[in-house]
Image (cartoon, coloured by chain):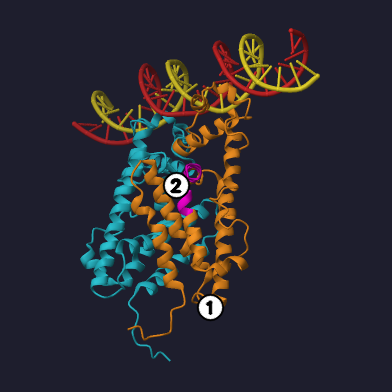
Chain colours: A cyan, B orange, C red, D yellow
Amino acid sequence: MKKPNGTKEKIYSAALQLFAQKGYKATTMREIGKQVGIQQSAIYNHFKNKEAILDEVIENLASSHLINLFENKEPKELYKKGKALLKHISNMFKLISYNTETDTLFRFMMQELFNNERLRVFYNEEFYQKNVKKLSIVFFLMMQDEMIEATDPLLLANEFFAPLFFYQLQIVRLKADNKSTAAAATLFEKHTDFFWDKIKIKEKNNSLF
Amino acid sequence: MKKPNGTKEKIYSAALQLFAQKGYKATTMREIGKQVGIQQSAIYNHFKNKEAILDEVIENLASSHLINLFENKEPKELYKKGKALLKHISNMFKLISYNTETDTLFRFMMQELFNNERLRVFYNEEFYQKNVKKLSIVFFLMMQDEMIEATDPLLLANEFFAPLFFYQLQIVRLKADNKSTAAAATLFEKHTDFFWDKIKIKEKNNSLF
DNA sequence: TTGATATATGAACAGCTGTTCTTTTAAATA
DNA sequence: TATTTAAAAGAACAGCTGTTCATATATCAA
């Protein structure tokens, strides 16, 4: 997105918004044009066709925070942060739910995931496999360092991500109907606290009181 | 579904399958007719129009196990089962992912959730609110009975459901591409064990070894 | 068997779809 | 300013959409 006020960028934004609201198939070139304030034929000066707009959306999805949770940092430097790392990831999920661009991308993805094989392959490799695997390595290192109790690191990674994803879904869903998301929003932090409390190494000291 | 071999039921099945695969909007009456083996015009002898088929799908969704997790049983009788109850619920989610009718319903729901307000309202009230609320009452009773440690029951209910939903999503997604679901399938049980182990009242006995 | 009812066909429809084309207008370059 | 280039409009297109209708063929009750 070079020029945010250029016509091409306006078309992209309008299209993404409509794709996320009504679905790719149900969105028409006439609607996109109308939202931008031009004729549908003028769109073709900026995009080869409708699918080319879709391609750009998927491309932007790939480079978004929705997918790249770890900003290219390696497990070895990440794990030392301990609970703070989990807090950071949790907060990213929360921000994605509330940022107007990323939540639209999320809504778009959820809607097209089951009818677009290319998107599914992309989601599986870039989001699910990559992030879950990376986080499980982080947990493994935490176990070695005796920060958390020893269990299946892959299970921990799934158990940590799953609620974040679920809460994200609920918030984006509630926002779609302009309903209050206050209750759901608190779950991100609560989850991280709950989760860390359950996996951290407990004090062997029994003389609490 | 009275007569499984009646034309109306064939139309319904074909439509549901196509809705789940391609989305409601992208599915044409001609495709549905083709899959059943009749002309598109003959469909109108059984359904008023395309939307009437959609209505029936949503109606069936409402009475499916996808939504009714507790089979009308009350928290007071449910909570006594302790971990066995959680195992039961967990297993239901797993079965839904593998049953050919319910997984199609799930796939359909995920796809239409974000462009169908009626479906969203239904999901919110019938699935999210009802089941989460019910399970949180169950957890509250478990706390009173000192079966599990005292915390926010609503958080526990969310934390228990979220991974089940997430794993269900992953399995239905993997099945859509005929990929192996073996690894994901084991997560249902692991989640329940992990979860229960973290919430149950620990033995105060410290002389383990 | 006869008549009535239910279900199938095939053609047709009006409207919408993505896309292309020619023409006009605006912006950039020289 | 004159000329080239980019972007807009407007009309038109072929194809597909859901739906209707008249007609034919089964199914069932009398």
Tell me which corner region of the image, top left, top right, bottom left or bottom right, holds residue B188. bottom left
**Is B106 included in the stretch rendered in magenta?**
yes
Q: Residue at x 47, y 67 (%)?
A: A186
Q: Residue at x 55, y 60 (%)?
A: A180
Is A26 situated left or right of A144 in this image? right
Q: Amino acid type of disc 1?
A: Glu
Q: Residue at x 39, y 73 (%)?
A: A198
Of marks 1 and 2, which one's residue comes earlier in the chain? 2
> How far across and down, in percent of the image, does residue C24 sit?
40, 23
Q: Which residue is mark 1?
A: B146
Near-viewer residue (A25 or A155): A155
Disc 1: host chain: B
> How far across and down, in percent of the image, does residue A207 sit?
39, 91
Q: Amino acid type of disc 2?
A: Tyr
Disc 2: host chain: B
Q: Residue at x 36, y 39 (%)?
A: A117
Near-viewer residue (A117 or A103): A117
Instruction: Tell me, for residue B98, which label it has, or none.
Output: 2
Magenta region, mostly helix, strand or loop?
helix
Q: Are marks 1 and 2 on the same chain?
A: yes
Range covered by the magenta-colored residues: B93-108
> How far across and down, in percent of the image, does residue A43 sit?
39, 32
